């Protein structure tokens, strides 16, 4: 009987990947807080997790004929969105540094939680394999 790591680890590996992508976007926003005309971005984490869950369920779209559209590249960055500012600055920059720092820290805490869930899954698999 083979062990499928994708099924054993569940959605947690996708959550970690999503948190890493979101951290990159939020850090980019913070780095450009003083850049005139810069538009703050964020990732729709829920949409990313929904897409990951659909991929895990096996109900994805398949191209069965050469005249069908290729859907493999569709919606690549559909989770990456522009943020609507509460109060945009005069120079057109939509980054609110305090809001971004708060989001970044919350994302870091969520990353740690996802990592701990994944670590628990891996520990459980190791114990099962060693017969404990």
Image (cartoon, rainbow, N blue to C red):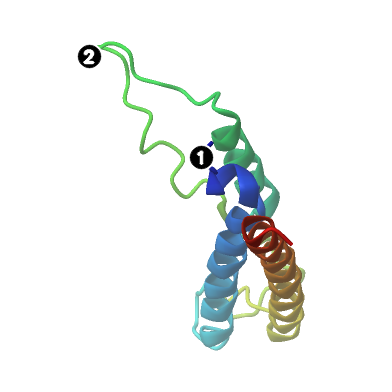
Compared to 119, does 124 lie above or below?
above
The image position of residue 120, as x and y in percent, is: 73, 65
Residue placed most toward the observer, 39 or 130: 130
| Residue identifier under label 1 | 2
* Picture residue at 71% right of the left edge, 84% below the top: 101
- How far is disc 1 from disc 2 in space, using C-alphas? 34 Å
The image position of residue 122, as x and y in percent, is: 64, 62
Q: Which mark is residue 66?
A: 2
Q: Quadrant of residue 13?
A: bottom right
Compared to 28, does 1 lie above or below?
above
Q: For the residues carrying marks 1 and 2, which lies nearer the camera in this image?
A: 1
Q: Residue furthest left?
A: 66
Q: Which mark is residue 123?
A: none
Q: Residues within 10 Å of mark 1 (few under 14, many from 20)?
A: few
* Picture residue at 68% right of the left edge, 69% below the top: 115
**Residue 71 shows in the view:** yes
Compared to 65, does 110 lie above or below?
below
Quadrant in which the N terminus is drawn: top right
């Amino acid at each position: 009987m083979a062990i499928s790591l994708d099924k054993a680890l569940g959605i947690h590996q996708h959550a970690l990947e999503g948190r890493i992508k979101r951290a990159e976007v939020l850090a980019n926003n913070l780095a450009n807080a003083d850049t005139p005309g810069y538009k703050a971005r964020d990732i729709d984490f829920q949409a990313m997790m929904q897409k990951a869950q659909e991929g895990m369920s096996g109900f994805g779209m398949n191209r069965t004929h050469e005249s069908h559209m290729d859907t493999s590249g569709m919606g690549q960055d559909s989770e990456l969105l522009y943020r609507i500012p509460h109060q945009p600055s005069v120079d057109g920059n939509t980054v609110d540094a305090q809001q971004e720092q708060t989001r970044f820290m919350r994302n870091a805490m969520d990353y740690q939680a996802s990592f701990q869930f994944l670590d628990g899954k891996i520990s459980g698999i190791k114990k099962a394999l060693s017969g404990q």
